[in-house]
Image: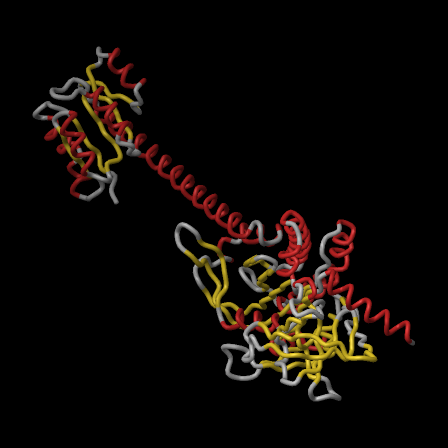
Amino acid sequence: MLDKILFVDDEPDFERLIRQKYRRMLRRGLIDFEFASNGREALRKLREEENVSLVMTDINMPEMDGLTLLEEIAKLNKHLLVVIISAYGDMDNIRTAMNRGAFDFLTKPINFEDMEITRQKALDEVLKIRERLRLQEEKLELEERNRFVQDTFGRYLSGAVVQTLLDSPDGLKLGGEKREVSILLSDLRGFSAHVERCPPEQIVATLNHYLSTMIDFILEYGGIIDEIIGDAILAIFGAPLSRDDDTERAVACAAAMQLAMESVNERNARNGWPILEMGIGIDSGEVVVGNIGSKKRAKYGVVGRHVNLAARIETCTVGGQILVSESTWQKCGPILDIGEEIQFVAKGFEDPVKAYDVCGVHGRHDLHLPHRGLSLVDLDEPVTVQVVLLGEARSSGLVQTGDLIALSPRGAIVQTASPMETFSTVKLQLAQTDEAESGHDLYAKVIRRDKEREDCFVVCFTSVPPEAEEILTALLEQKASVH
């Protein structure tokens, strides 16, 4: 696009004189002109024309003089230069014009050689101004992008990963895209029961200490924290940056998180806070990641069936357990130390889902979980309990009488007349009165049917209030004293 020059002069022969001087350049399309006879007309043309780069204006004109025009041009916020043309003896006005921002001046009668030098010098300066503006706009865009990255990822990614995003403008797609990722979902077992029993400040302190510990491990292993909902954490490995070992790091991170629960609970015990247990589910596969939400509120998030499957797998876990999907196990290969294989029907999935109990991660991570055996002992006399099925089980809400026939501090074998679904949640009422006290209710997850007795089910406790714990302890001590 040609740089256009606007000449402003009320002399009737001025336009003819300029066109005559530059006729050859005009014919060759090397220059473009506009003319105005006063400042008011010049302002109108400047508002209409987008590509005027230089204004050459007389000072003394009717309706609006050159000095006033100079002030008005400054208000237009257009990146153009102004050269003042005036009589040689009018130095006071020329000085005033220069103080008001004029780029240069020419004197009448016009020396066209001098005009050409001034014209070229001014247009060169316009090019420099445009380049500075371009660089400034790029800087602002980069700063805006960096702010976005920092605001979106700064609290949820390690500093090294954030810096990689900042250093690689093409390494991050801010729109939606499909990615192969591993989804880690962790949740505390029975934390809702603690919320009902403990003071709010104690619950918040317990939760904050737990979350800060787990978040540190997720960031250390290169995950992004997509969501924190209460005591649940959803983390992604493989977006916004992907690496060859995303799945391996996700499982290793889960192992490190479970091992860290010992130190979390040591502090909880010292402070008189609740002892916590956590379950973790992991699934791997293709999902859609991107900025989800509206202009007012948006977040970098993930959607897809693998998010749902990770959640379904996590609900099958007990405290201290990591369950991974078949796809996650296959991606990791022999580095995983796998214990039991389980199979269950998940809501929203047609085929039965296989999941694998991770006991450890070999190789460079070398992380191994402690044995979680229930160490059940048979009771000499069954203990009658009321069993309430909870959650999304088909028989949810069913209340039946059952018997505890084996017990440990972490679980029990319950004998019931009606079967209980594996991985369903149950409430066991230990109180022996018609109007049972809620403090005697404990919560458990059904982990399997007993291998030797068809009507018996192994449950793992997820929440044991102090009153219920006293009853269990008394039963175990009674058993120990007899033998």
Classify residue 356 by image quadrant: bottom right
Q: Is residue 193 above or below residue 399?
A: above
Number of marks present in the image shown: 0
Q: Nearer the viewer, residue 180 or 209?
A: 209
Q: Nearer the viewer, residue 137 or 200?
A: 200
The residue shown at (61%, 70%) is 314
* Image position, residue 126 (x, y; %): 32, 34
* Image position, residue 381 (x, y; %): 80, 79
Colouring method of the image: secondary structure
Q: Nearer the viewer, residue 201 or 414?
A: 414
Q: Is residue 6 above or below residue 465?
A: above
Q: Is residue 368 above or below residue 295?
A: below
User: Do we see residue 378 in this rendering?
Assistant: no
Classify residue 281 by image quadrant: bottom right
Left or right of 451 in this view: 113: left
Classify residue 226 by image quadrant: bottom right
* Image position, residue 148 (x, y; %): 48, 48
User: Do we see residue 325 in this rendering?
Assistant: yes
Left or right of 123 in this view: 345: right
Q: Nearer the viewer, residue 414 or 212?
A: 414
Q: Which residue reaches farthest left?
A: 12
* Image position, residue 237 (x, y; %): 59, 64
Left or right of 197 in this view: 471: right
Q: Quadrant of the N terminus?
A: top left
Q: Quadrant of the C terminus?
A: bottom right
Left or right of 269 in this view: 173: left
Q: Which residue reaches farthest front?
A: 434
